[in-house]
Image: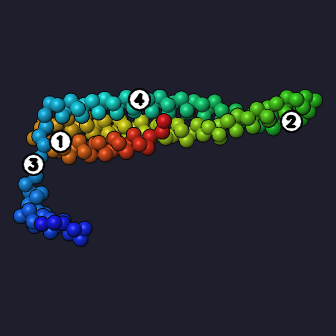
């Protein structure tokens, strides 16, 4: 029978002599093999590497944020009580205020705080996904989720993380 655009999935299944429920019942699950375990362990290893890389970036951007943000807070606090004493040296006060503005501008432009937070979040997400694989692979085979469903779920999460993670 030729199928048109108006044919529904139920019509197509009836032509094959199947109902939607029998196609689900007849579906065979992929069994766990050594190769599937090795493949998932490779993914887990790659996720751990990415988690560590994001953790390293998190620490780097946090350090940059602290180095640039703390002086912009502390310099005005130090200058305020000293304004009466440094009126004879306006260049010192001007340089300190200019440096505060420059540091604040650099920190705002590069947004190290946001980069730090995002990398920390993705480090945790990659580590969490790696733990899911580790837990599933350590279970006895009879208690595991079917490998095809588990792999697909992990692949979807992994692809989503890779697509949206900060560089």
Indicate which disc residue 52 carries. 4
User: Looking at the picture, how far across and down is residue 35, in whole percent?
Assistant: 17, 31
Above or below residue 158? Residue 57 is above
Dot 4 or dot 1: first in sequence order is 4
Residue position marked by numbered label 3 in the rendering: 28
Q: Residues within 10 Å of mark 2 (few under 14, many from 20)?
A: few
Dot 2 or dot 1: first in sequence order is 2
Above or below residue 103? Residue 153 is below
User: Looking at the picture, how far across and down is residue 10, in whole percent?
Assistant: 16, 67
Dot 3 or dot 1: first in sequence order is 3
Indicate which disc residue 83 carries. 2
**Numbered disc 1: secondary structure:** helix
Q: Nearer the viewer, mark 3 or mark 4?
A: 3
**Numbered disc 2: secondary structure:** loop
Q: Residues within 10 Å of mark 1 (few under 14, many from 20)?
A: many
Dot 3 or dot 4: first in sequence order is 3
3 sits left or right of 88 in the view: left
Residue at the spot x=62%, y=37% of the render? 110
Q: Quadrant of the N terminus?
A: bottom left
Front-most of 7 and 99?
7
Q: CA distance from mark 3 to mark 1?
A: 11 Å
Residue position marked by numbered label 1 in the rendering: 147
Where is residue 157, by image quadrant?
A: top left
Q: CA distance from mark 4 to mark 1?
A: 27 Å
Dot 2 or dot 3: first in sequence order is 3
Q: Nearer the viewer, mark 2 or mark 1?
A: 1
Q: Nearer the viewer, mark 4 or mark 2?
A: 4
User: Looking at the picture, how far across and down is residue 68, in whole percent?
Assistant: 66, 32
**C-beta proximity under 8 Å, tags 2 and 3:** no
Dot 4 or dot 2: first in sequence order is 4
Where is residue 53, by image quadrant?
A: top left
């Amino acid at each position: 029978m030729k199928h048109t655009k108006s044919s529904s999935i139920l019509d197509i299944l009836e032509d094959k002599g199947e109902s939607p429920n029998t196609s689900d019942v007849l579906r065979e699950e992929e069994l766990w093999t050594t190769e599937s375990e090795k493949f998932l362990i490779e993914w887990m290893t790659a996720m751990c590497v990415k988690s560590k890389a994001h953790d390293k970036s998190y620490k780097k951007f946090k350090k940059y944020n602290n180095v640039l943000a703390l002086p912009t807070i502390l310099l005005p606090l130090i200058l305020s009580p000293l304004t009466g004493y440094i009126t004879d040296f306006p260049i010192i006060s001007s340089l300190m205020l200019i440096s505060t503005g420059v540091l604040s501008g650099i920190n705002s432009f590069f947004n190290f705080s946001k980069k730090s937070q995002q990398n920390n979040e993705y480090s945790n997400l990659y580590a969490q996904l790696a733990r899911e694989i580790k837990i599933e692979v350590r279970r006895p085979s009879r208690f595991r989720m079917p490998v095809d469903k588990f792999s697909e779920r992990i692949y979807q999460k992994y692809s989503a993380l890779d697509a949206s993670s900060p560089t």
